Amino acid sequence: MKKISILLLFAFLTMIGHSQESYTPSDENLKNREWFQDAKFGLFIHWGVYSVMAGGGDQGIAEWIMNQKRIPIEQYEKLPSFFNPTKFDPNKWVATVKKAGMKYITITSKHHDGFAMYDSKVSDYNIVDRTPYGKDILQQLKEACDKEGIKLFFYYSQLDWHHPDYYPRGRTGQGYTGRPQHGDWDKYIDYMNAQLTELLTNYGEVGGIWFDGMWDQIDANWRLDETYSLIHKLQPGALVGSNHHKAPFPGEDFQMFERDLPGENTMGFNQTGTISELPLEMCETMNGSWGFNLKDHNYKSTKRLLQTMVKAAGYGANFLLNTGPMPNGEIQPENVDTLMVMGRWLDKYGESIYGTRKGPIKPLHWGATTQKGKTVYVHVLQLAEDNLLLPKLEQKIKSITFFDDGTKAKYKNTEFGTLIHLPYDKRQEVDTILKVEL
Ligand code: H79
């Protein structure tokens, strides 16, 4: 009897030893979480062989074209032979990122189509073996990033429309692909872990892994414990996040929100539940597409993007803004223009964004607050009146000044909060920032 309970206890201890339930992030990981929260702004890059299709003349299609147009694997496999980005210049990408005021890049290493954009040895379905270009873009980008102090994260799709062992199939990649109606799920997970091992061993220090696609079959046996342990073992500092649209699972280091501010669900699929205590990140598109789409000119204004970034910062969340490079390897000029405008704004107002944490007042219809030490930045994004009622703060206010010219703002404390006078001639088009000293 006693022997059995000791055995059981042993089994239990071994289990939690591997389990991410008991995951304690390393010091390096915690340091990187702080870095991440300070960084605030990154570039998301969706680049794959689908860029050759440029959306196929359809405004709403890009990296999903294989699934949406039901292209069988046999046909889709021709795309890599058309992929030859002769104008790809990683140094130019990184220069653009720096000028935009971004601190990191998250790039697709493999999207749902299963095609690896790097030199993978566990499958020849990759950029080196299958394209006339023949070079590893992740490698080149990492070198360019290292030179400039930009961190590189890898997006990795758990969902795979190409691998035969991604079986049973989930909500997508059904029927048309031409794969046999059988497969060995565990072999697929092994394959995925092998690819992740490559990504975490061959490219030096990686910022983190950005998972996507688990929503395809959320209840499948993803063996998350094993995958997350593997990543934390290979690179204890790398941050793990997953776009499963749910509250974070054990072993994850940050929580992400797709095209929604934390806690919002305008997209309909963001059932993230509560906002966790982990570092947060919101990703957003500049038009309506992630990958390159020739017809999608539905660009959001820089004003709107900057205001979304400010609101995200008000939640303490990073803003990961996307671009889908063209098949020739260049970033769309329209996107570069937008990034330059954002960079110029950050040159001037970055103090109120970088290194801040969410402010004492949760974002409201008029704007948001961010905080650094004893300074609260009040970001007034839209206000019809010339007075702002700032809800009561716990600490006493010492002074309020306009960020732009350092002049004092008139205010008075009322029982409902602080009434701040905001004359129209002090207003900025994008964001009128007040510095509140506590
Ligand atoms: O990589 C980009 C997109 O390709 C990918 N994530 C971003 C970062 C993405 N795929 N799908 N979506 C985003 C939207 C999610 C749609 C879903 Fe559903 C709604 C997933 C589950 C419900 C539609 C219905 C797709 C599967 C079932």
Image (cartoon, rainbow, N blue to C red):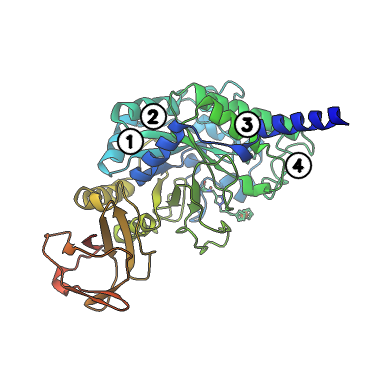
User: The N terminus lies in which quarter of the figure?
Assistant: top right
332 or 76, which is in the foreground? 332
Dividing the picture into quadrants, the one containing residue 166 is top right
Mark 1 → mark 2, Cα distance in angstroms: 8 Å
Q: Amino acid at mark 2?
A: Leu
The quadrant where residue 112 appears: top right
- Residue 164: % across, % down: 71, 34
Question: Could you say where residue 221 lies in the image, as x and y percent from the top left?
Answer: 72, 40
Question: 10 Å neighbourhood of mark 1: few (<14), some, or many (≥20)?
Answer: many
Q: Circle 1 sits in a helix, a strand or a loop, which is it?
A: helix
Instruction: Residue under label 1, please give it.
Output: 93
User: Mark 3, residues whose alpha carbon is within 10 Å: few (<14), some, or many (≥20)?
Assistant: some
Residue drawn at x 62%, y 31% is 192
**According to the image, label 4 marks what residue?**
168
Q: Are the residues at dot 3 and dot 4 in contact (C-beta closer than 8 Å)?
A: no
Distance in Å between CA atoms under marks 3 and 2: 22 Å
Query: Camera-side residue: 41 or 280?
Result: 280
The secondary element bearing badge 4 is classed as loop
Q: Report crowding for label 4: few under 14, some 14 to 19, many 20 or more residues within 10 A (C-alpha).
A: some
User: To which residue does mark 2 refer?
Assistant: 141
Quadrant housing residue 156? top right
The three-letter amino acid code for the residue at tag 3 is Met
Along the polypeptide, which appears first: circle 3 or circle 4? 4
